[in-house]
Image: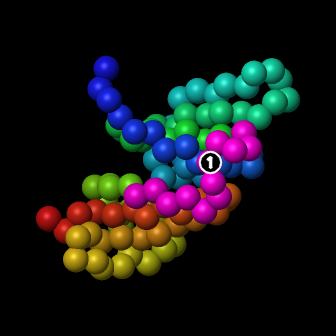
Amino acid sequence: MDEEVIPILHVADAEVAAAWYQRLGFVKEWEHRFEPGLPAFVEVVRGRVRLFLSEHSGDARPDTLVYLRVRDVDAVAAEFSATVGEAPWAREVELRDPDGNRLRIGTPAR
């Protein structure tokens, strides 16, 4: 097993959030609820990148910022009709998911 860090993002509705992340190329891997009707905890995956989406209060703070490196930031920007900015280290776009979590997405300059 490789060691890794998996950010946890708070979401109000895991199904809505997973559908939004699908637009970024993520696929829902699994969902857990302790019992039907209780909050969901979901994993979404894009290649080797994983995120946990949690409806549980206290699992994550609102307005979290996650940086995601991708091969083609222009494709991501086009999917969301967003403008790509230039930074010395990368071409980047910043998006907000339906719950206000921020994703800064970039393709490295070199």
Q: Is residue 39 visible?
A: yes
For residue 61, above or below residue 14: below
Along the line of sight, the residue nearer the viewer: 26 or 60:
60
Q: At which x and y percent is residue 33?
A: 73, 25
**Residue drawn at x 71%, y 33% as measured from the top left:** 40
* Label 1 CA crowd tier, 10 Å (few <14, some 14–19, many 20+): some
Q: Which residue is mark 1?
A: 60
Left or right for 100, reference 8: right
Secondary structure, magenta segment, majority class: loop
For residue 91, above or below residue 56: below
Q: Is residue 17 visible?
A: no
Magenta span of residues: 55-67
**Residue drawn at x 46%, y 56% as measured from the top left:** 66
Q: Quadrant of residue 31?
A: top right
Q: Look at the image and say whether residue 7 sits in the magenta stretch.
A: no
Q: Look at the image and say whether residue 65 sits in the magenta stretch.
A: yes
**Residue drawn at x 28%, y 63% as measured from the top left:** 107
Q: Quadrant of the N terminus?
A: top left
